[in-house]
Each structure stands twice: as C-alpha cells, then as structure tokens.
Amino acid sequence: MQISSVNDVKIYNLSHGKSLPEWLSDRKKRQLQKKDVDIQRRIELIQDFEMPTVCTSIKVSRDGQFVLAAGTYKPRIRCYDTYQLSLKFERCLDSDVVAFDILSDDYSKLVFLHCDRYVEFHSQHGHYYKTRIPKFGRDFSYHYPSCDLYFVGTSSEVFRLNLEQGRFLSSLQTDAVENNVCDINPVHHLLATGTSEGRVECWDPRVRNRVGMLDCALSSLTEGTEVQGLPSISALKFSSSLAMAVGTSTGQVLLYDLRSNQPLLVKDHFYNLPIKSLNFHNQLDLVVSADSKIIKFWNKDTGKVFSSIQPQTNINDVCIYPNSGMLFTANEDPKMNTFYIPALGPAPRWCSFLDNLTEELEESPESTVYDDYKFVTRKDLENLGLSHLVGSSLLRAYMHGFFMDIRLYHKVKTMANPFAYEEYRKDKIRQKIEESRTQRVQVKKLPKVNKDLALKLMEEGDDEAELASRKKKGKALPSILGDDRFKVMFENPDYQVDEQSEEFRLLNPIVSKVGQKRKKKLRLLAQQAAASQQVDEDEEEPEGRGSSEEESSDDDKSWVEEVREQRRLLRQEGRDRRRQERKDADRNTVLLEREENAGEKMAGSKKTSQPQFYQIKAGEEFRSFNDMAHKQRLQKASLEERLKLEEHSGTSNMDDTAVGSKQLTFTLKKSEQQRRQQQAEREHHEERKKLRRSAGHLSSGRGRGRGGGRGRGGGRGRY
C-alpha cells in the first residue's frame, strides 16, 4: 500500500506493490510472501484483480456486488464478486471490446460492442445472441423506457436497436461526419451525442427530433490556450436534469447548464491529451475528470482543485464505487489500480476494515518536511559565515538547528564555495570511472601482512558465495578482509601470526580440522542444494547419516593424534634445547679455565720457577698431565677428526662427554618364575633328544611294496 497526500488529502493506493506471477505454484508464492517485505505489506483487496495484458474498461453493477472489467490479450471479460473478494467467472470473446454496459442490477444481462461491428449479448449462463451494426461503433447508450440501444460511430447516423422487438429501428440523422460518444440523461432521458467537429447534439427519443446543439470547440478556447487542432468531443456525462460535462480531445472539460449555450466553467488539464472519463461526485459537488496521465478532482462551481492522482501507467477508464471514497482504474498495465480516498467517503461495506486501517495510519506520527526550507546547524552557519543571522527573521529555530530559505541557502553556498560545481563534477566523473573499473576482471591482491590467512579467508569467501548463489537465498555474509574493524590485522606487522610459536602449533591442528570440516560441509550443502532443485522438498531425508557421523568421529581422533604429536615434538625440542644450553655452558667454563691458566702462566714466567698445581674436579679421573693436553686438543678438533681418530684406535670412548665422565653398565635380572620356565624348557628339549623311534621298516625289503609281502597268489596256494 502506498500513501500520498495532495492538497492535504490522503490517497491510499491499495494495488501498490509487487504482483506474483500466475505460473508460480502456491508453495513458491508462500515462500515469497515470507521473505519479501514488499509482498508482506501488500494489500490484495480482491484476489487476482488484474488482466493478462491490458484493461480497457471497468464498471460496477448497480447493486454494488459485482465489478466487471474488459481487457486483452486474449479478449475477455472478468467478473469479480465483492462479497467473496475473488473472481467469479471469466469469459473469452472473439474480438476486442470497445465498450460494454450492464443492463440489469447484477451481471445477468450484459451488452458488448466489439471492434469488428458486432454487438454481443450475454445472459447469466454466458453468450446469448450476436448481431452486427452497419458501421464501426465507438460508443452506445441504453434507453430504459423504450428498451432501445443507441449506437454511434464512424457515421453520421445514430443506429437504434430495440431489444423488446428484437430489430433495428429507423436511425437518427445528425449533421456530423462522425460521432464519438453518447449519453442519456437519467432524469428526462435526453440523448446527447458528441461529434468529431466539436459539437454536442441533443435529441428527444420520444419524437426522434434534434432539440438543441452546442458548439463546444469555440467555447473551449480560453486565454492562453494553444490551439493545435480542432477540438473534438471525447467524453460526455450527465449529472442531474440540467448539468452536463463535456470533455474535448485537447484536454479541456466544459460544464454546461442545459438552459444556456455557454459553458459555466472551463477546466484545462494542461496535458493536451484527450479526456477519457468524466464522473460526478454529488456528495462533495466534485467533478472527476481523467485523461491518460492524471485524474483530477475539482469543484464544479469554482473549479478549485480538490486533489489529483497520477498513476505510473496510462489510464483507459475510471469507475467510482457508488456512495464511497473508492475508485477503480483501467490502465495500460495488467494490474487494475484501486484507490481509496477517505475524504470522498467511507469504505464500501465489503471492505469496511479499510477505515480502521487508515485511522491507525493517521494516528502514527509523521515528520513534517519543509520543501522550501533548508535545515542547517550552527556549524553549517559558521562555515557559511551566517552566524550573525541567529535571532533574525531569516532563521527559524528548530531542535538543534535552524530552518532557512532554500533560495538564500543556495545563493550563500555559491558565494562561499564558487568551485563547488567543479568539485561535484569531478566526483561524478570519478564515480563513473570507478563503476566502469568494477566491470573489469578483478585481480585479488594479497596484503603484506598475514598473506596465508588472507588467502585462506578468500577461499572460504568464494565457497560461501558459490553456496549462496546455488541456494538463491540472497547475499553471502561479509568477509573479514572487507571489514574495516580488522583492517589493521593485515597492515600492521605487529599482528603477524608466528607459525613457529607453541600456541600456534598446538591450535593449528584443531583450526585446520575445523576448516576441513567447514569445507566438507559447504560441499555437502552445495550438493544438497543442487539435488533439491530436482526433487521435491517434502522427500524424506536420505539414508547414510551414520557414515557421516563415523567420519566426523574419525576426524576428531585424527586431530587429537596430531595435537599429541605436536606436544611430543615440543617436549623433544625442549630437551634438545636444554641439552644444547648445557653444552654451551660447559664449553664456556672450559674457555674460562684456559684463560685463567694462560694468565697464571704469564704471571709465573715473571717469577721464579715454581711447581704448578691442578685442581681435580669431582667425578674426574686423573691420569697424567699429557692426557689433559690430549683432551684439550680433542676439544679443539672438529667432529670429523674426532670420529676418524676413534675409528683408527678401534674403540669408542664414551667416558668423556659434555655431561660428565660417567659410564653405566647393567644386566637384566630375571625373575624366579622365568628362570624355572627356562630350566623346564631345557629339560624338555633334552628329554626329547633321548627318545628315538626306529624307522627301519620303511627302507627294508619286507615292506608292503608291489614286489614284496604276501600277495593274493600266495594266499591261494594254501587252499
């Protein structure tokens, strides 16, 4: 629903909002209604209140229950039941409808004038009869007392078709070349026809004679009116027994009193477009005139504009619901607009909830907007050099600032910053260039800090974007790389991730496994989204859930093992580091001893020869002084030279090491049970060796071979 206000008159457009396509399923429509806010706020007053392509005319039955609309394509008529707020029936026709009318109080008797000269009659069940008029018709009116249909069109004659007798009667001969519109007064049944020459001819159906003529073309020309052609009559409407409104093809509306040949009032729409529709609102003495661009409400006595409606599409017809503030419009658009103006009258009985809805909307606070004033703060006034105007009539205090005339503001702004337009122009050019650059192929640049993390985030962002595009659920979540809050993490070197630190090595297996699970989940969701496009959402969940759970449990075990391995490596590195530190400490102590010994030697050379003393440390074995020198030479030698020396000597001495001169030898002590078991096994083996089984019969000649032993022949010799 859209709310607009013209001359302090609230106008509610009940048809504003997105319309759902007809080919969508009910399930898809419900999903869109849940997601789209515009569809949720839409008020569908009458269900399917639209045409496939264009609506040409619309009318309301006299009982107010049915709304009938004619449109295309294909040519059809639709009837809507206001009590059910839905479509009652739809009937397709053979050709486009030029005009139609409702002869009964409901939809049971309809007349259609087609563009191919046919006149079609419909009853309650459907098509009833079809006939043809001599010339192409443009409009018709029904005379209730005599049951006559008067047709006007591309002819000077007005054709009469009597529905009671079922035949054409003698036509009325006019002075015009063509007649565009016609109307019958509801009080005294005077027939008026509008001609293409800008005249209105009035006929009395009782005597079939012309009783008057009005020259509206000359009367429509007022001061300042630009004449582009001869104004023809495009709309005609009677209000009471004496009032008549005439619309011209140049956009003027003339109000007449039938007792005078001069118009009482001439109203110009200033669009130079033909007047499409004319209606009277008798409760407020208003005239409702419409061309293809705008609908105007104005007072029929003074011509003062009451309000106006300007839809987004061109208007073909306007219909006011009787005794209410609601009106329907037929547009050059599939959707037929419904407007509700509370100032014109209450809502119809079948949609009385609109009154409560509009009252609630009016109670809600609305901010006042001053179109001719500019709101400025004290800082803005200081920048413009207008601080001395505070307290004068040029500034109006409001909240934390002031309102000033917009013309004064623009003038001072131009004087204060004469190059503002040039800066604005440069900014616009720069924006255009940036927009054109975004259409090129974008090269992803990695930041200087945390490149691996940035690359990982880019890959995850691409996967999420691809999944969001597959699911069609809108935009993906913003990435950390594009968030200004985390910008310093990729610019300041202090935020560089140390991958060799203990914390990172312990957390990396967990993070990597979580990332792998996330990628796997994204792939599964992408596969499910692709599969859901082919199958219905109501299918049962496929089997195989247990396998995924097993895989997740295996993944948990794998990352636990990786964390344990990292802990073991960290402990090993710690031990190696401490061992190396002890080696370095021992090496430093040896160097200090050398320096001390060298200093003592230099001091002793100056003195008399005195015996030298050496300190034997705890745990060391004293061999000889030459052995100490040999040990020092070995310490100076490289590892390769020491290994070669040990290989040459044939022994590997492990006594003197960096951690001390200790050597351990040990043997494993067996338990009493193990010794008894080994003793029992040895005795068993000895016993088995003593036992001997003879196998001599296998190689002797007395065996059961082919040539030896007792055969059958031997046995026979006994008997």
Image (cartoon, helix red, strand yellow):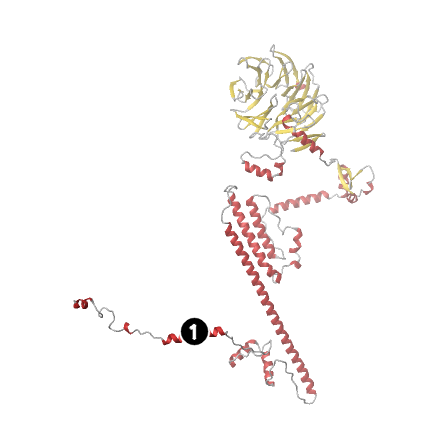
Q: Identify the image quadrant of the C terminus.
A: bottom left
Residue 291 seen anywhere in this rendered image of the structure: no
| Residue 682 position (above or below residue 446) | below
Q: Position of residue 392 (x, y in %)?
A: 83, 38
Residue under label 1: 681
Tell me if mark 1 has few (under 14), some (14-19) or many (20+) residues whose alpha carbon lies within 10 angstroms of its own.
Answer: few
Q: Position of residue 498 (x, y in %)?
A: 62, 61
Q: Position of residue 649 (x, y in %)?
A: 52, 81
Q: Is residue 470 left or right of residue 381?
A: left
| Residue 75 position (above or below residue 589) | above
x 63%, y 80%: residue: 618
- Identity of the residue furthest to the bottom in this view: 608
x 61%, y 85%: residue: 625
Q: Secondary structure at mark 1?
A: helix
Residue 545 seen anywhere in this rendered image of the structure: yes
Kind of residue at badge 1: Glu
Of residues 163 and 261, the one drawn nearer to the viewer in this rendering: 163
x 55%, y 53%: residue: 517
